[in-house]
Amino acid sequence: MALLRSRTDTVLGGVCGGIAKSLGWDTTTVRILYVIVSILSVAFPGTLVYIILWIVMPQEP
């Protein structure tokens, strides 16, 4: 199963929605975990990773 950005469950780019779908988790849980990890890493690396994933991950057909 490929990691794809979500078309239906997007807030900003669909990255967390795509990760949640591929893991079989709830999208809200993935978003909360992502925010917590980003805050704990002083936000910059988390933001940079999100932007890179947004560019690199293909969107669902």
Image: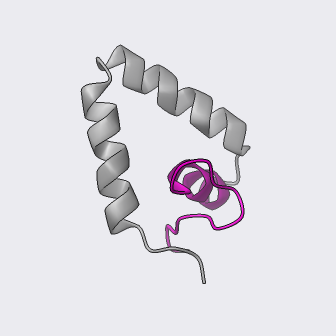
Q: Residue at x 70, y 46 (%)?
A: 25
Quadrant that contains the C terminus: bottom right
The x, y position of residue 17, in whole percent, is 62, 53
Looking at the image, how many numbered discs can be counted on the residues? 0
Where residue 10 sits, quadrant-wise, is bottom right
The question of residue 18 being in magenta is answered with yes
- Image position of 36 with respect to 5: above or below: above
Query: Which picture quadrant has residue 6?
Result: bottom right
| Residue range of the region highlighted in magenta in the rendering | 2-23
Q: Is residue 59 above or below residue 20?
A: below
With 4 as the anchor, is 57 left or right in this view? left
Residue 55 drawn at (x, y percent): 33, 63
Quadrant placement of the N terminus: bottom right
Q: Foreground: 12 or 27?
A: 12
Q: Which residue is found at the position 58% from the left and 76% from the top?
A: 60
Inspect the magenta stretch and tell me whether residue 22 lies in it. Answer: yes
Residue visible at 34% across and 33% down in the picture: 46
Which residue is depicted at the point 33% across and 66% down?
56
**23 w.r.t. 7: above or below:** above
Determine whether 6 is above or below 23 in the image. below
How far from the left and from the top, in percent, is residue 35? 50, 26
The residue lying furthest to the bottom in this view is 61
Q: Residue furthest front?
A: 12
- Give the colour scheme of this rendering: one colour
